[in-house]
Amino acid sequence: MEASVSLISAHPQGEGKTAPKAPVGRWPVDTPGGRFYAEWDDQAPVTREGQLMFFFQFLHVGGRWEEFLRHCPLHYTGNRGSGAPNVMGTAMLSILCGHWRYAHINAVRGDGINPGLLGMKGVISEDAVRLGIGRIEEKAGHNWLSDQILGSIAPALHLPWILDIDVTIKPVYGHQQGAEIGYNPQKPGRPSHVYHSYFVANLRMSLGVEVRPGKEHAAAKGLPGLWQTLDKLPREQWPTFSRGDCGVAC
């Protein structure tokens, strides 16, 4: 007669700490504000802002949000300032919701979920965002944004690519700096700005935009901004071809 003997491990695991398991039916999402768990509810109302969690995960995994704030030229000296994370986070939430004016920022002030995902203390008012952005010196702010745009696109520029150079007329209403009466086919006589844009063809990814007065619509007026953008890229990341009006000579 054989007796059954249970095997005893020579090296038991002991009582070490084990990693917490994700709740059933959910999956972890790491964001700048920490780890959260996402789940689908077929019966809940649909909202487009609820999907921002996955975009914030993309920013966190690539380190883009931390890099964006690390080099931000907005600084407060006292303890009563809104802080760069809250100013830039509020502006980005408003932009992601499709807003295009400062007054629209008030629409996101009731959002109690997405600000925490970005590591913000809360959404601030439109006046605080306007004053905060106004504190940034123009040249420093332009260089900062340009570096951030190129930094996020640069890995794709090692492959051959085509540079698209485009000019867009933007009519201006009210009194805005640089608004002049120039070539404006849609609204003749209306002051306007001119946007000289530089894109990666097919991908439609913007490398930068040079905003000029309404009279400077000629393609050659955008060349200084174009060369400033290209000078920030290594020579091996320059475009293979460029497409633009006949006034552009690269």
Image (spheres, rainbow, N blue to C red):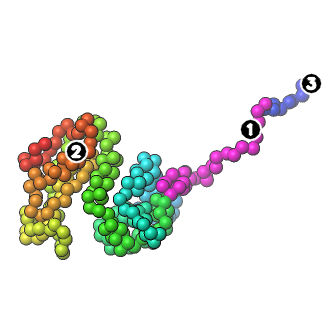
- Secondary structure beneath label 2: helix
3 or 2: tag closer to the N-terminus: 3
Q: Position of residue 218 (x, y in %)?
A: 8, 55
Residue at 15% across / 53% down in the picture?
A: 222
Residue at 7% across / 49% down in the picture?
A: 247
Alpha carbon distance from label 3 to label 2: 86 Å
- Kind of residue at disc 3: Met
- Secondary structure beneath label 1: loop
Q: Position of residue 149 (x, y in %)?
A: 31, 50
The image quarter in which residue 140 lies: bottom left
Alpha carbon distance from label 1 to label 3: 33 Å
Q: Are marks 1 and 3 in contact (CB under 8 Å)?
A: no
Please tell me whether residue 39 is drawn above or below residue 107 in the rendered image.
above
- Does 41 lie within the magenta span? no
For disc 3, the neighbor class at 10 Å (few under 14, some 14 to 19, many from 20) is few
2 or 1: tag closer to the N-terminus: 1
Q: Is residue 84 visible?
A: yes
Please tell me whether residue 98 is drawn above or below residue 56 in the rendered image.
below
1 or 3: tag closer to the N-terminus: 3
Q: Which mark is residue 13?
A: 1
- Secondary structure beneath label 3: loop
For disc 1, the neighbor class at 10 Å (few under 14, some 14 to 19, many from 20) is few
Q: Position of residue 239 (x, y in %)?
A: 21, 39
Q: Position of residue 58 (x, y in %)?
A: 43, 50
- Kind of residue at disc 1: Gln
- Does 26 lie within the magenta span? yes
Q: Which residues are magenta?
A: 10-38
Q: Which residue is mark 3?
A: 1
Most distant residue in the right direction: 1
Closest to the observer, 233 or 58: 233
